[in-house]
Image (tube, coloured by chain):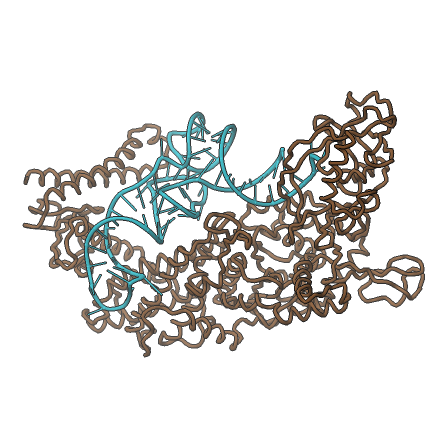
Chain colours: A brown, B cyan
Amino acid sequence: MDQPDKGYEPQNVEKRWYAFWEEHQLFAANESDSRPGYSIVIPPPNVTGVLHMGHALNVTLQDILCRYHRLKGHNVLWMPGTDHAGIATQNVVEKKLASEGRSRQQLGRENFIDAVWAWRKESGSAIIHQLKRLGASCDWARERFTMDEGLSLSVRKVFVELYHQGLIYQGDYIINWCHRCHTALSDLEVEHEEISGNLYQIRYPFPDNSGGIVIATTRPETLFGDTAVAVHPEDERYQNLPSDTVLLPLTDRRIPIIRDAFVGMSFGTGALKVTPAHDPNDFEIGNRHNLPSLKVIDDHGLMTDGAGIFEGMDRFKCREAVVQKLQEQGLLVGIEPYPHNVGHCYRCKTVVEPNLSRQWFVKAKPLAEKAIAAVQNGQTRIIPEVWAANYYEWLNNVRDWCISRQIWWGHQIPAWTCEACGKMTVSLMPPDTCASCGHSVLIQETDVLDTWFSSALWPFSTMGWPENSPLLKTFYPTSVLVTGFDILFFWVARMMMMGIHFMGDVPFKDVYVHALVRDEAGKKMSKSKGNVIDPLTIMDQYGTDAFRFTLAAFAAQGRDVKMSEKRVEGYRHFINKLWNASRFALMHVNLDSTTIPTGALSLPNQWILSRSESVIQSAIEALEAYHFNDAAGLLYQFVWHELCDWYLEAVKPALYGKEGDAILEQTRAVLWRVLKNTLISLHPFIPFVTEEIWHKLPGTQGSIMNARLPQDSDPGFGQFVNPESEQQMAIIINIITGVRNIRGEMNLAPSLKLNALIQTDLSVISDTIRQHGDIIIHLARLERLSVDVLGERPKSAATAIVEGAIIYVPLEGILDLTKEIQRLEKEIEKLNDELNGVSKKLNNDDFLSKAPVDIIEKVKGKHATLSDKQQHLQNNLNKIKALL
RNA sequence: GGGCGGGUAGCUCAGUUGGGAGAGCGUCGGCCUUACAAGCCGAGGGUCACAGGUUCAAGCCCUGUUCCGCCUACCA
């Protein structure tokens, strides 16, 4: 057998096994298979994206689930792909063109689209390679892209159907406009951020230039678009006005004074300027009062001719100019600093402009109702459940979804306007003639659809819809969607709406919502803050398995995960520990170790089999409940602190042949079995190192990915769970720890062999010691061990009390009496504190009469043990003091 | 403005029906014990944010206060 490296070196191991898995098509789903199906669609990363911590966590959790279900023998589909990220991708390619001194306008629409495809071919799948570095076991042969032929067909189909069902409409409304990206944005794509602006008070004089009404605004430059001034109908200050119109400053226009209950009487002067074309509220007011809408800011953020002498000026420059002009004319009544929230484009951070324009919308309410019901009636579970509240909250207040974007990269809206009659034809394929008049000159809508519109179809569009494909039959609805809460509305809610509407069934049975990864200080990682930790660097440095295990351990945390390299380092040590434990095991097991010989098992062998089986059982339960951190923690604890710390140390004499051939063979076989099952259980978390060890383990065949969880492959699994051996081992561990404690506290060299006397009146303890004392002698480094009933204490002995027994370590001539007294006093003090708490309960009549019997018994038992312990210690302390 | 989450060891965080406060890292002391110094053995460390309440019993349930964070929103 080749001797594995002394320390685990992940680099080439990872590359080698990933290539092996792909080559043997171990990630492939089978679309016509009778095994139970399990499916996940990946949240498609932006094609422009590079792997960040959020992807890493998200993908690792999915990979754990997929690998786990394969080990259960399920037919797993993990559907991968990317989305076309309309605005982001267009920005990237435009920037690239700009660096070559070109613009998309110069290229024209068709050439520009070709340029985007060329870019995608060249650098668009970087993130896919990065996902592979993580070990993601996606079915790569099925990789999808939202702009692919099939997915584009789905998009058009959905658009056409929703349009004919009256759930998509076109209309003139106030939308959020980004001047930089030059497109409309949905409400969700606007990020609100507080900025320190000013509140300007401006006087709008009456027609005779006297007095007037003072309004308050943060945006004086929009006054050119004002078509009214509004006051509250019941505001006494404005009951008897000399005129029902005012003069609009800096113009020669007169606008009406209207009365609308929207206006807050207590804010500012109680008078509001109404600009229907540039403010959502004003738009509503305008509709109520039939006011005209006047656009004074164009699509590039420049003032229109409506702004008179300010035409062509940037909107923010214009603000300053207007303020100055008003001041000159004595119409500026006041300025005060006023912090307020302003919407910014989520892609480029430009201040968005509420803008009146013609856009396409999805009528969300009817779709939302079904999406709400599906979660309420349990067709889809949201885990953890707290997120369901957010989901309901948003869907209950959902507003119509603006889906048209004035960019080129994306799914062009399948609507054509007839040149002759001006009517619209909406159809799956380009129509030859107008549906209304039969004319043949038709012009297609230039807008494209929001990228999220196509993402909303992802769970079924990737599986071949609108055809009723075998893939859909086998794998829809998907088993679970794993995602961060930041796209619960953007994506999850919309997939629910579309899935239910078009498939007649929810897109996923479970939604597992995980945390967001932040930096060590809890700040969102961002390039501008410079606090980004690159997952690829982490993987280079610590290995992918260590990184994945860290992420799994993080998964339980509520809303944030604070990433720290220290944690990853700690888990790298764990990987190394597993590696070295395996290395040790591989020195001893062989092809004959694959079955446990008949005959009585030694205590350590009974114990580790028992522990192994119950831990695996618990880890499986944890995974089924999406408690990734619990599963990871259980296995970590088992491997390090049971298998390595106790079992391997306890059976070394057996493995070195000191307990005879029978025990040697038996121990080898138990070690083989436990290691094998541990590797399989850990494989979903740390696939590379487990595969590497698997191939070195005698008696295994092929990839660990083809193995089965012991629970599913071994009908006798669970037979070794054995509380009695666990109890016996606990006794032994307690005694060894007691002796070690004395050794440590008394500063006795580990090489110094000691004698120990255990006194106990409990037969379970004395029997265990008599039968298995060799383990204690070995691990506590004893010369001699004896057992007796409680009685005289040896002279000059250090003492430790464990449950049910006293340990004496005679230290004739070595014992430092002062030190021992300190030890005992400290111990007694600790016991007293505990004892006080317990006694208080037992002296309380209410407790005795009202608490359940089993609790009372427990507390009584506790009290007995503690006072016993305390008494023994006190006796010893007294005797030692007497020696002084 | 509305909603949600959090405050537990020096740090990062677990703690699932209320019933003996945990882990990892860090700290301190001792060890090159032939799988592992990326290791082994031992130790120390907490008024569970604060104040009330319910209960025999509260980190956990209720009320209030305070601090932090997130989401959402049309008061100019």
- Indicate left or right for B22 with A113 as reference: left
Whether A672 is drawn above or below A618: the answer is: below
Measured as percent of width and height from the top left, residue B54 is found at: 45, 28
Q: Is residue A188 visible?
A: no
| Spot occupied by residue A640 in the image (x, y as percentages of width and height) | 33, 59
Whether residue A657 sits left or right of residue A572 in the image: it is left
Residue drawn where x is 65% and y is 38% of the image: A197
Q: Is residue A397 above or below residue A240?
A: below
Compare residues A584 and A411 and report the one nearer the observer. A411
How many tags in the picture? Answer: 0
* Quadrant holding the N terminus of chain A: bottom left
Residue A256 percent coordinates (x, y): 86, 31
Question: In the image shown, does A79 or A361 lie closer to the viewer?
Answer: A361
Q: Quadrant of the C terminus of chain A?
A: top left
- What is the quadrant of residue A325 in the picture? top right
Tell me if A110 is positioned left or right of A197 in this view. Answer: right
Q: Nearer the viewer, residue A36 or A744?
A: A744
Along the viewing direction, whichever of A266 and A249 lies nearer the viewer? A249
Q: Residue at x 73, y 54 (%)?
A: A182
Q: Inspect this view and state whether residue A311 appears.
A: yes
Q: Residue furthest front?
A: A328
